Amino acid sequence: QHCFSKSEDGFLYCEGLKIQDALELVEKRPFYLYSKPQITRNFEAYREALEGLRSIIGYAIKANNNLKIIEHLRHLGCGAVLVSGNELRLALRAGFDPTRCIFNGNGKLLEDLVLAAQKGVFVNVDSEFDLDNIVSAARIAGKKVNVLLRINPDVDPQVHPYVATGNKNSKFGIRNEKLQWFLDAVKAHPNELKLVGAHCHLGSTITKVDIFRDAAVLMMTYIDQIRAQGFEIEYLNIGGGLGIDYHHTGAVLPTPRDLINTVRELVLSRDLNLIIEPGRSLIANTCCLVNRVTGVKTNGTKNFIVIDGSMAELIRPSLYDAYQFLHADDYNLNVQEFEFPLRSAVIARPSIQWSDLVLEEADYSPLFLGSFNEHVGLLVQHIELISPPPPNAEISTFDVVGPVCESADFLGKDRELSTPAKGAGLVVHDAGAYCMSMASTYNLKMRPPEYWVRNLWISALSLHFTSAF
Ligand code: LLP
């Protein structure tokens, strides 16, 4: 079951919520719309796949750092994977058990490592200088740090170069030929470091599980080598990276079960705990960015649908030439399957309570500076219209573009769509991962509000923040 579906009369729903109803109720600006039940279902797929193994599902907070979403994932049983001090602080604020958190990254700062050491978070060693900093942090905190070596196994993840990380010229991790140096360095610091595991992360949007298996086989040889020197390695961390079907072609992509099953025997054969670090595959398909059509125009041979959303709210297409599905006709689900009556779905415009405000986040990043604005919202990713097109609307090939002042500002290119009316809703699907978390205020656009659908209710996930005037 998937959270977005089209009814026979041509309206797009998120669970039981008719998105057109939401569009009419919320402030006139793009918004992110999530399905809370879909987040739960995605988590359950991992939990079930991991049955029979000792494991930690470390959610990669960089994919989506909305406080309520991460609290929900924590409540379901996730640990957290962190790549900055602020992500670490946010995870602690959200109540994650620090001993189920992993602090990753090639440029971790000493002060952030000190916090990680104090709290008992696992730390991945990324380089010689990183090891020095971890030793210093352990001394300052007066705590021994549980470390994993991030080994760069040089397995080609077959993905866009910007999201490939495990190749030999990558800025991440250590090369296996340096392994002995790191083992000696750990041995030299018995009061500061305890080596508990090995980590690798190959890249993101991986669509073949054999790639994970190749990496796991190599990691076993490193783990054997490390154990042979007397280290009690307990954890294999195989990182994140499972892709999703952004194109909505119905292509059969590996599931969490396929992923876990390719490494299960290896993990059991060495009596290891398995750590995985999914981001995208937990959260991407739970959300869309909801936009309004500002107008339609033609220049030369190109037709454009201009919407109010842009590369500021959702930068992936501009940055990676990534395909976000925009099209209207691919959903053919039976709407009656929903457990509540679609037409009577209630949309509550929530009154904003101070307790709903994500106040502490305001301290974390300049992106959160500014005064609170009263409205809240929803957003979605893949592109389609949310309501039936006007009668006799022509179907054409469009670039779907935003209002931002540069030609890189597109959400989708060459999409077959019915010519929409002004004000029509259009969604970009699969927008749960690396969309809101990468949103900017370029052209002084405001970071979009987020809503989620919880059964009948739509609620505000965050207030958005306006610029300071
Ligand atoms: N672990 C490590 C060490 C990572 O670097 C990442 C992602 C993950 C886990 C989670 O990977 P996932 O399961 O989400 O693929 N902004 C890009 C994606 C960058 C991924 C960075 N690292 C995008 O929009 O596609």
Image (cartoon, rainbow, N blue to C red):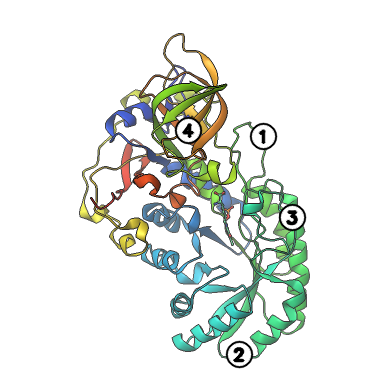
* Quarter holding ligand 1: bottom right
Query: Going 38% across and 45% down the picture, which residue do you hit?
Result: 443
Looking at marks 4 and 1 on the same chain, the residue that comes earlier in the sequence is marked by 1
Along the viewing direction, whichever of 134 and 349 lies nearer the viewer: 134
The CA distance from mark 1 to mark 3 is: 22 Å
Q: Position of residue 248 (x, y in %)?
A: 59, 33
Quadrant location of residue 363?
bottom left
Name the disc covering residue 401, or none. 4
Q: Position of residue 5 (x, y in %)?
A: 48, 28
Front disc: 4 or 1: 4
Along the viewing direction, whichever of 22 and 31 lies nearer the viewer: 31
Q: Is mark 4 within 8 Å of ligand 1?
A: no
Q: Amino acid at mark 1?
A: Ala
Front disc: 1 or 3: 3
Q: Label 1: which residue?
A: 251
Name the disc covering residue 156, or none. 3
Q: Amino acid at mark 3?
A: Asp
Q: Is residue 3 visible?
A: no
Name the disc covering residue 190, or none. 2
